[in-house]
Amino acid sequence: MYRSHVLVCAGTGCTSSGSDKVIECFKTEIEKAGLQDEVAVVSTGCHGLCAQGPIVVVYPEGVSYSLVKAADVPEIVSEHLVKGRVVNRLLYVEDDGESAKALKDTDFYRLQTRIALRNCGVINPESIDEYIGTGGYEALGKVLTEMTPDDVIQVILASGLRGRGGAGFPTGMKWKFASGNRGNTKKFVCCNADEGDPGAFMDRSVLEGDPHVVLEAMAIAGYAIGSDQGYIYVRAEYPIAVERLKIAIKQAHEYGLLGKNIFNTGFDFDIELRLGAGAFVCGEETALMTSIMGKRGEPWPRPPFPAVRGLFQKPTILNNVETWANVPRIILNGAEWFSAIGTEKSKGTKVFAVNGKINNTGLVEVPMGTTLRTIIEDIGGGIPNGKKFKAAQTGGPSGGCIPAEHLDIHIDYDNLISIGSMMGSGGLIVMDEDTCMVDIAKFFLEFTVDESCGKCTPCRIGTKRVYEMLDRITKGQGSLEELDKMEELCHYIKENALCGLGQTAPNPVLSTLRYFRDEYLAHVVDKKCPAGVCKALLSYKIDAEKCRGCTLCARNCPAGAIIGAAKEVHKIDQLKCIKCGACMDGCRFGAIYKE
Amino acid sequence: MKSLAELKAIRDRMQNQMNLREDDNEKRIRVVVGMATCGIASGARPVLNKLAELVQTENLSNVVVTQTGCIGLCQYEPIVEVFEPGKEKTTYVLMNPEKAEEVFEQHLVRGNVLKKYTLSSTNL
């Protein structure tokens, strides 16, 4: 029996900022103070505020400490745990300059609605008892003892839940398509945990913070469609998630919540892990299933859809981690509860991994229909260094950018598509005025060129050609004809590629062309990069008025490109300059500028 | 595990623990134990642990037991303050684990203030 719980985030973000050491230190310090029977140290999943990690929350007070280092731990133990005095200097401080005590009182959490992430940062993901303590596996018990498989599908249909992995297909429909012929044929339930978008990490956080929710949801789906076997396809680059899934599966087996004759109802269900090697294309459903079957991850043409003929040629349903994380709650709270949240056609909440040029990098879960402005300015804490918002990329390399003029758009599946982006899995990359949109398009194309599996020509060769054209544009070698040709090729790839990867690969180019054509024109016609990013198009210059001739830049220059004697105005030799910016970063008088 | 009853048993056992991590403290009764040097020296720790244990074993999910620093009445430590939403706070003085158990039974469970242990019972 503990009087106090110390929760330390052990998600990937906080672990890389040293939370494992913090946990160790808490254990030894608490023992030193003789409190080991009074205070429990609990490793949890992600709290979402990764930029402020490692995060430590002390209950029952609910006091949250941020940026905690191992060296801070003795003070927290002796002050807070022994004497009950909050260590003010470690409290998370919000923008208004006041110390906010409980995390739930901060704007970051106040504006969120947590369904998929509800246990993340609250329970110990390696304890099935804690999951059960928050109502875990009750939904599975309910469907097995009180509901028919068709009832279950009906509830999911009525809830309006749509796939959180990208395309937004209604989850209940998928289950319904796969539900025929129950008991007469082998079927499979798969979990897509092959999160590959640059900058997206919500699936990882759910797996790390609440792995049992995925197991429970998959068993529910197994019951609904008549399947006894599930596979979780998770990338090997998520070692903490893989480890916690293994522990969760083992514990569920020990409790008889997976395996044979669950709850004595005659229902059997088992789950196996399959580790992906990190190919982006394996996030596409048919390629993922090919990979589970032990073959090289390449997509196959649809139809037949997986619900008809999927894994091992059998009917299969495949849902994304976040989708699964919603299912048990919907079963317990009812379809009406879920469909009351969100917008007309997009129900529930969506988790976004907010990163890029934003203060509160991290995970946020908001009701569908929340405006982009709320996410970026209120929850995300705005852009650092007082810079101006330029655009946000949703959907990663498959999505598009949303410019400032659409900041007030209510985010849901259909609204995003109408402005040329997509929901995607929830990566949200924020860009400020220093970002060159052509360069961003090039970055995403470079990624898809790398990740194209090579099976179909439009994707394999088409994306490569688009990349080359973008490369020429950023070097000032593009022409207006080529710009038109590139746009035409983009449309061609969209229409002809075999799978989702190729069909969406041109989106970053098309959406930047749609909203930032002037930037493309500046590169092509004026041979200038307005954001000052594309190196080939800019040159560093020294302002003769401001230069004091201190020689610092000349000494910093790795290329020996700066000439000038002490106390005389310096000059940059443009032929030698490699445009690294070292001179500008070091100049104390702000005398160096780029144009 | 073969029945829902077994699942429920685990849930009930764990729920007492999980209640501790409830963020919604405004509607709950707060029991605050003075845990500064003076409190600790006069035996506040066993009092705190007794109260925390009783709240969890008896599953009083509307009560949260926390600690605070010195409130300036060192000669009356260990001090336990009970804050009920919408009511005046009650200050119990010169506590020990046995008295704390009485306070728990009478005040926290039944809602009767134990006048004989309060600060107003002293001739301060």
Image (tube, coloured by chain):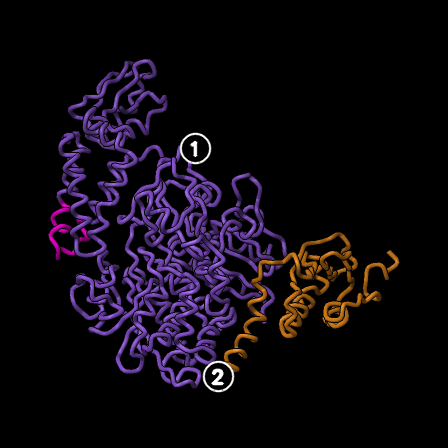
Residue A140, position as x, y percentages in the image:
44, 75
Give the residue at mark 2: B3
Give the x, y percent position of residue A538. Answer: 23, 26
Residue in front for this viewpoint, A22 or A170: A170
Residue A461 highlighted magenta (yes or no): yes
Asked if residue A24 can be seen in this view, the reply is no
Dot 1 lies on which element? helix
Q: Chain of mark 2?
A: B
Q: Confirm whether the magenta stretch covers residue B11.
A: no
Quadrant of res B78: bottom right
**Relative to A503, is A314 above or below?**
below
* In the foreground, A161 or A3: A161
Q: Secondary structure at mark 2?
A: loop
Marks 1 and 2, how far apart at CA: 58 Å
Residue A230 can be seen, yes or no: yes
The residue under label 2 is which amino acid type? Answer: Ser
Colour in which chain B is drawn: orange
The residue carrying mark 1 is A386
Judge left or right: residue A465 versus residue A12: left
Q: Amino acid at mark 1?
A: Gly
Q: Looking at the rendering, in which quadrant would you find the C terminus of chain A?
A: top left
The answer to whether B122 appears left or right of A570 in the picture is right
- Residue B9 x %, y %: 54, 79
Res. A19 image quadrant:
bottom left
Depth check: give the residue in front, A542 or A158. A158
The image position of residue A245, as x and y in percent, is: 36, 69
Locate the N terminus of chain A and report the quarter of the image it occupies.
bottom right
Q: Which residues are magenta?
A: A449-464
Q: Which chain is purple?
A: A
Secondary structure of the magenta portion, mostly?
helix
| Number of numbered discs overlaid on the protein picture | 2
Q: Nearer the viewer, residue B84 or A136?
A: A136
